[in-house]
Image (cartoon, rainbow, N blue to C red):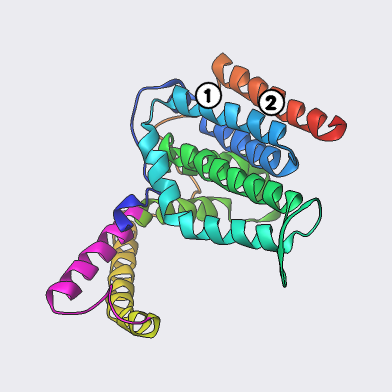
């Protein structure tokens, strides 16, 4: 299960999406998220799905990578669908037994919620899959640069985001190693009651926290040895420059967004 978590990974593939300016990709991702939560019909979700499919095809990333990002969240999706199915009581009644009632609106809301969450996972994963952590940090810092006038620590915030994204795969790999080591020592991680499993997690969490703090200390020492002093006077190897393809992609995103808004109003 841990190997299926792909959050924070970057796949260096030559594609149209990879070559887009990361600033535009961040803005388009935010617009896409707003588009998902604005649409309240299957037609709107269909338009969002078409937009997502086009982006996935242009990224040239294997679709199984997106499936891997969805698999760990399947229990959450099922619980969300069941809650919407049983707690939405409007519409035609299809099944009614005591306090359990399944209606047409409940089924529609459940399917819409599942589609919305899946598209949200794919769209947000696409941003990290096609953008390196360093480039993503520079883009966030450039987008938030107006806040520097208000003494907001923009560079520090972007650096923390970059470090967090960078160490997610590392911590997942470390967790997998700890679990394998504890199983080799006879620990029963996957067996027993729910209470026993929760107690056995202590033998995983404590070494994981120690490892995380050790890595953080090593990183801080390395940054101090390299005379890191924040963003002041810092230069960049790659300068962010927009191109016509960025404006074309942004225009297409706006077109899909406006279409969802119009359909949501008139349908």
Q: Is residue 200 magenta?
A: no
Q: Nearer the viewer, residue 52 or 85?
A: 85
Dots 2 and 1: beta carbons under 8 Å? Answer: no
Q: Which residues are magenta?
A: 169-193
Q: Position of residue 146 (x, y in %)?
A: 68, 43
Question: In the picture shown, does residue 87 fall above or below 135?
Answer: below
- Disc 1: which residue: 54
Magenta span includes 179: yes
In the rendered structure, which disc, 2 or 1, sits on the residue that comes first in sequence?
1
Picture coordinates of residue 227, whole percent (x, y): 35, 55
Residue at horizontal 58 percent and vertical 51 percent from the top: 154
Give me the disc on residue 262.
Answer: none
Q: Main secondary structure of the magenta part?
A: helix
Is 186 situated above or below 42?
below
200 displayed left or right of 93? left
In what element is the residue under mark 2? helix
Q: Position of residue 225 (x, y in %)?
A: 29, 58
In the displayed structure, 99 sits above or below 249; it is below
For mark 1, does the 10 Å Cα neighbourhood hold few (<14), some (14 to 19), or many (20 or more) residues? Answer: few
Q: Nearer the viewer, residue 94 or 181?
A: 94
- Dot 1 falls on a residue whose secondary structure is helix
Write down the residue under mark 2.
256
């Amino acid at each position: 299960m841990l190997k299926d978590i792909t959050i924070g990974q970057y796949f260096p593939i030559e594609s149209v999406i990879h070559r887009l300016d990361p600033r535009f990709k961040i803005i388009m991702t935010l617009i896409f998220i707003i588009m998902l939560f604005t649409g309240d019909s299957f037609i709107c979700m269909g338009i969002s799905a078409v937009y997502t499919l086009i982006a996935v095809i242009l990224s040239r990333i294997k679709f199984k990578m997106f499936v891997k990002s969805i698999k760990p969240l399947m229990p959450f999706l099922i619980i969300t669908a069941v809650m919407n199915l049983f707690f939405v009581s409007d519409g035609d009644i299809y099944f009614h037994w005591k306090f359990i009632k399944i209606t047409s609106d409940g089924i529609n809301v459940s399917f819409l919620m599942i589609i919305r969450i899946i598209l949200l996972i794919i769209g947000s994963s696409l941003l990290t899959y096609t953008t390196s952590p360093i480039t993503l940090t520079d883009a966030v810092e450039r987008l938030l640069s107006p806040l520097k006038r208000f003494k907001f620590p923009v560079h520090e915030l972007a650096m923390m985001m970059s470090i967090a994204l960078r160490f997610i795969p590392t911590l997942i790999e470390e967790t997998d190693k700890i679990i394998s080591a504890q199983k080799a020592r006879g620990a029963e991680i996957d067996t027993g009651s729910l209470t026993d499993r929760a107690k056995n997690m202590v033998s995983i969490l404590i070494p994981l926290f120690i490892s995380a703090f050790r890595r953080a200390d090593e990183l801080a020492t390395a940054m101090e040895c390299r005379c890191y002093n924040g963003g002041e006077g810092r230069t960049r190897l790659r300068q962010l420059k927009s191109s016509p393809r960025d404006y074309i992609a942004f225009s297409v995103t706006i077109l899909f967004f406006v279409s969802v808004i119009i359909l949501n109003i008139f349908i």
